[in-house]
Image: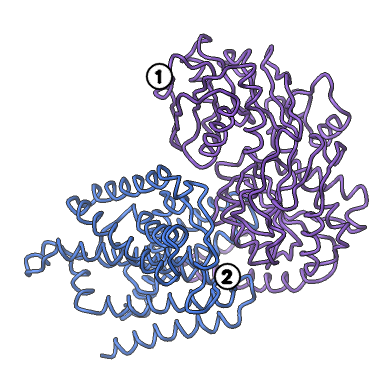
Amino acid sequence: MIDARRSLLLHGGIVACLALLAATLPAYHAGNLTRILVLAVYAMGYNLLFGYTGLLSLGHALFFAAGMYGFGLSAALGGLSAGAALLAGVAAAALVAGLTGALALRTRDVAFMIVTLMFAQAGYLTILYLGTWTRGDEGFVLPAAARRLAGFDLRGDGARLVAALTLFSACFLATAALTGSRLGRTLIAIRENEERARMLGYDTARLKLVAVVLSGTLSGLAGAAYAMLFGYVGASFATVQYSILPLLWVLLGGAGTTVGPLVGVALMFYLIDWSSRVTDAYMLVAGAALIGLTLFAPQGVAGLIRRKAAPWLP
Amino acid sequence: MTQPPRPAPTRRRALATFGAAGAAVLLGDVARMAHSQGAGPLKLGFQVHRTGIGAAYGRWYERVATAAVARINDAGGIAGRQVRMIAEDDGTDPRRGAEVLDRFANLHGADLVFGPLFSNVVIGSAPRAAELKMPYFVVSEGHHVASGTLNRYTLQPGITDVKSQVRSVAPYVAANIGRKVTMIFPDFAFGHDHREFFTDAIAAQGGEVIAQIPVPPAETSFTRYFPRIPRETEVLYHVMVGPAVLTFVREMGEFFGGRGPALFGFIDSLEAVDIASPGLEFLEGSHLWEGMPRFAQPDQTGHDARYRAAVGVDDTGASIDDPRDVSTYAHMFGVWETLSVIKAGMETAGYRGPSDRPALIEAVEAMTDMPLSDDHPQGDKLFNGRTHQVFGRQSVSRVEGGRLIRVHETSVEDTLYEDEVDYTTRPF
């Protein structure tokens, strides 16, 4: 119970700190915070599968893009309102995640990584193939109506930040609740020793599929939200780069921790932001810093804190 | 005397250093933003493809932009104010492109942004430009500006779009090269624009496209596509972009061995590539579209000569300093001419600061004729303020003796088409 109270304080405190930052940061960093919060939702989705269930996917861009295109196409071509399109995006991601999981979970370990990578590549090529509607790599701009939610015009910086903070907070608290729930503990049991979990009577195949669907749906929600908040849908978000990024974010922040995705996205974002002011080889700098952090903190920042100072950290 | 051993780096020290560095940069940003609000030189944000698939273009776009800004400053600046160009790499990535606009607006305090070429970056960044109310001058060739999909803050006054390019050269292709055309093009939006616009344009000339061969992006070998070219093909229309262009052209030569259909291509397939490269001999006698002739022509204008000298390009289109460094000459003039338009627009609008941005856009929208001059060395142009798109002459060149010789130049009128949007009716 003490840990539960600490967890509540931690997550509530982080949300409160973020709200304070949102209210006080100068415009440039407030804009960055908006992007970080949405991308952190994507990282949380990835963390659910990788950090808590132990399944390393290299194809999460497929789910992110499914949400993004589910939102974008239903709004731009189907004329749905932003709220309905958001639901369409989430449903598209859940469907794609279910189908992908049903097939990819027939494999494991390295084969699972390769199969998810191939699914994502197939998704990317499908977007290009259907260029008549998707405008392929070029992408398309969303109409103004698709960026108005519950009476708020999300093209304004303030409304966008509030929307991103609301979305993040909801997903953050939901993820925290999930990882502390019976389902979350079972997923951790699968991560730690799948054979043992199966011996104890858990249907690990079904639970892993549930994890893939939950993870993919959360990633798709992030994709749909990114399109809604920033007004653009494009195939570059379906490339392999966007499958690798959430892995790096989660590794950097701390896999299997609820705060890790946020920490990882924020660190990586500012690492690139700052190093790009110094050199064009900013990705090299980011890579070197990642190697350094991996040497000093192989469990990620939040993992290090959990090991050194706060073993209760969820 | 021995030095005391340095303490070994510890995890705590490393993390503390990392955190301290972060705090220092954040404080620096606050100071920089406060400073950027003050008076001083005009700040022009240059969104450049320094890395990613557009890097070959970005490198030359940056050289041209640097030269054009130096020329403006040497001539007294814009309305007496010096110009400071701030370049930011967008990685040829639309997400980063939009982030870069935030940096220009909220970190550097830029007055406007110019420069991107790749369509995905332009389309990914344009919504953010409108939100930031930031004039966004693109040099992209894409039809996305004139098609009406973007916004009032996005303009393309320095380079023509693919629709007008394709439509204006189709009559020459039909009359002089052949009427049965097979198209091979990249299977993404840029290639699809070529496919759609040229198919219609050649049909209007009594010709037809008898086969369309899309090539997936990131393809590294093209040999397997060439057998799909029908035997009755009279003209093979090719356009390719990206790092594999040289492989594409070489493999095309290996496949045909000089016995294939006549070739008509867009210079995009050979931008930044030495046309005299080994393996490209088969291109002799083929035709290419050029936005601006890479090789100095016998009737070269003084404007072209001065422009070449300013951007450091010799008469063959290569860098004066390194003949192996071939420029993207057919496109990069757009950066030069865009900066000329920006200067003229700011001076007409009496631009003093960000509150005058709408006046700047209205001043550019009011422009029409842009005569051949040092400001517009590619040729005379006509700007359409309603569609935010400029129209200008196009060249068809023939490969002769390893050089590109212009054999046809369209008129500006040849490139015009019906308006698809009127941005001037949209609010700021």
Q: Which residue is mark 2?
A: A155
As drawn, is B13 to the left or to the right of B176? left
Q: Residue at x 59, y 16 (%)?
A: B283
Circle 2 SS class:
loop
Q: Quadrant of the C terminus of chain B?
A: bottom right
Number of marks in the image?
2
From the image, which quarter does the N terminus of chain B lie in? bottom right
Q: Is residue B4 above or below residue B65?
A: below
Say left or right for A177 vs A250: left
Question: Which chain contains the residue that carries disc 1?
Answer: B
Chain letter matching colour purple: B
- At which x and y percent is residue B399? 66, 16
Picture quarter containing residue A156? bottom right
- Where is A243 relative to B51, above or below? below
Chain of residue at mark 2: A
Q: Label 1, on which residue?
A: B227
Left or right of residue B164: residue A177: left
The answer to whether A130 appears left or right of A118 in the picture is right
In which quarter of the view is residue B316 placed?
Answer: top right
Whether residue A295 is visible:
no
Nearer the observer, A247 or B15? A247
State whether residue B133 appears in this view. Answer: yes
Under mark 1, the amino acid is Pro
> Label 2 sits on what residue type?
Arg
Chain A representation colour: blue
